[in-house]
């Protein structure tokens, strides 16, 4: 559930929807945008100082969502710099600082609330361009979602396997849930993948060690039968 639902429909309506979802057996995670809201906002400045005002605002936001009745998790999206991290001396440290403190705040309100984040699928350039240190983030978060969007990167299912397996092998505690692109690409082709292709991508992710899969995005996805997926020796969810 996107955090904007609280703004668009009001707190009481959002909480009512969460309860209805819970009553149907659906666990609700709040999807909040960290460094982007109408435009990018860096967590640190070019002189290396942290933007504590903005960071603390986002931490308090995460803490609030964790305390909402029926919420099972808080998910951090846009937890990155827009390919400009190398221009900020403390880009990586600012993201690590936010995550460490946000997770602590979440757990202080609801120890069972899961903290997760979306990350780029590029281990070799994540630090330089995006300020994302997987080795550090995986120490704090319950699970991490690499956005393994094969369409956007003009890749195939084998790439999903390789990227997922690489993150699984190098995690320092967090589970890896593969983020799959359920449609062709963002390049003017939002045609949903077929059920068979999307199911194959999901099974490949689990075979590579992912504990789960995330389908992006609602409205342009085929609905697969998750019960048909087979647990692998590396994936026990």
Image (spheres, rainbow, N blue to C red):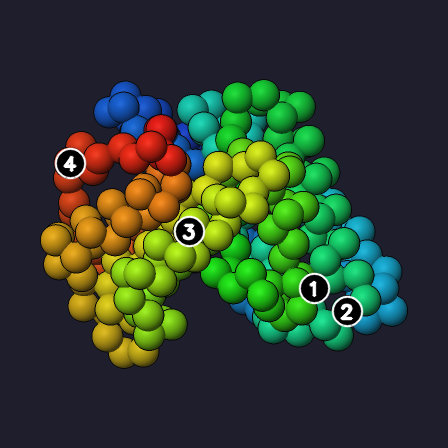
Residue under numbered circle 1: 42
Between 234 and 92, the one lying in front of the other is 234
In the picture of the structure, the residue carrying the numbered disc 2 is 88
Q: Position of residue 108 (x, y in %)?
A: 66, 23
Tell me the residue at 39%/41% (across/down).
209
Q: Give the left or right position of residue 42, taking residue 143 as reference.
A: right
Q: CA distance from mark 4 to mark 2?
A: 46 Å
Residue found at x 33% / y 74%:
154
* Element carrying mark 1: loop
Mark 2 to mark 1 CA distance (whole Å) = 9 Å
As helix, strand or loop, the secondary structure at mark 4 comes to helix
Q: Earlier in the sequence, mark 3 or mark 2?
A: 2
Q: Nearer the viewer, residue 6 or 182?
A: 182
Tell me which numbered mark, 4 or 3, is placed earlier along the sequence: 3
Check whether the beta carbons of the residues at disc 4 and disc 3 lie within 8 A of each other. Answer: no
Residue furthest toward the front? 233
Residue at (30, 29) in percent of width and height: 26
In this view, the mark in front (2 or 1)? 2
Q: Are marks 2 and 1 in contact (CB under 8 Å)?
A: yes
- Residue drawn at point x = 72 percent, y = 58 percent: 92
Pick whichever, 12 or 113, lies toward us.
Answer: 113
Q: Is residue 149 above or below residue 188?
A: above
Crowding at dot 3, Cα within 10 Å, few <14 / some 14-19 / many 20+, comes out as many
Mark in front: 4 vs 2: 4
Q: CA distance from mark 4 to mark 1?
A: 42 Å
Q: Is residue 36 left or right of residue 225?
A: right
Image quarter of the N terminus: top left
Looking at the rendered structure, which numbered label has been put on residue 164?
Answer: 3
Dot 4 or dot 1, earlier in sequence: 1
Judging by the rendered image, the residue that carries numbered circle 4 is 228
């Amino acid at each position: 559930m996107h955090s904007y639902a609280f703004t668009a429909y009001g707190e009481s309506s959002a909480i009512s929807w969460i309860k209805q979802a819970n009553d149907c057996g659906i666990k609700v995670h709040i999807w909040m945008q960290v460094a982007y809201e109408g435009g990018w906002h860096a967590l640190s400045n070019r002189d290396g100082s942290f933007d504590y005002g903005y960071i603390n605002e986002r931490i308090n936001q995460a803490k609030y969502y964790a305390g909402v009745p029926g919420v099972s998790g808080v998910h951090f999206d846009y937890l990155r710099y827009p390919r400009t991290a190398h221009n900020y001396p403390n880009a990586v440290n600012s993201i690590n600082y936010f995550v460490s403190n946000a997770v602590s705040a979440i757990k202080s309100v609801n120890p069972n609330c899961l903290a997760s984040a979306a990350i780029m699928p590029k281990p070799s350039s994540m630090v330089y361009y995006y300020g994302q240190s997987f080795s550090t983030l995986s120490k704090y978060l319950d699970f991490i979602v690499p956005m393994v969007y094969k369409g956007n990167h003009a890749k195939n299912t084998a790439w999903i396997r390789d990227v997922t397996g690489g993150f699984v092998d190098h995690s320092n505690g967090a589970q890896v849930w593969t983020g799959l692109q359920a449609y062709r690409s963002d390049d003017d082709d939002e045609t949903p993948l077929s059920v068979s292709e999307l199911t194959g991508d999901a099974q490949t992710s689990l075979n590579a060690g992912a504990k789960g899969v995330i389908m992006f995005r609602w409205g342009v996805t085929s609905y697969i039968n998750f019960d048909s997926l087979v647990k692998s020796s590396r994936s026990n969810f």
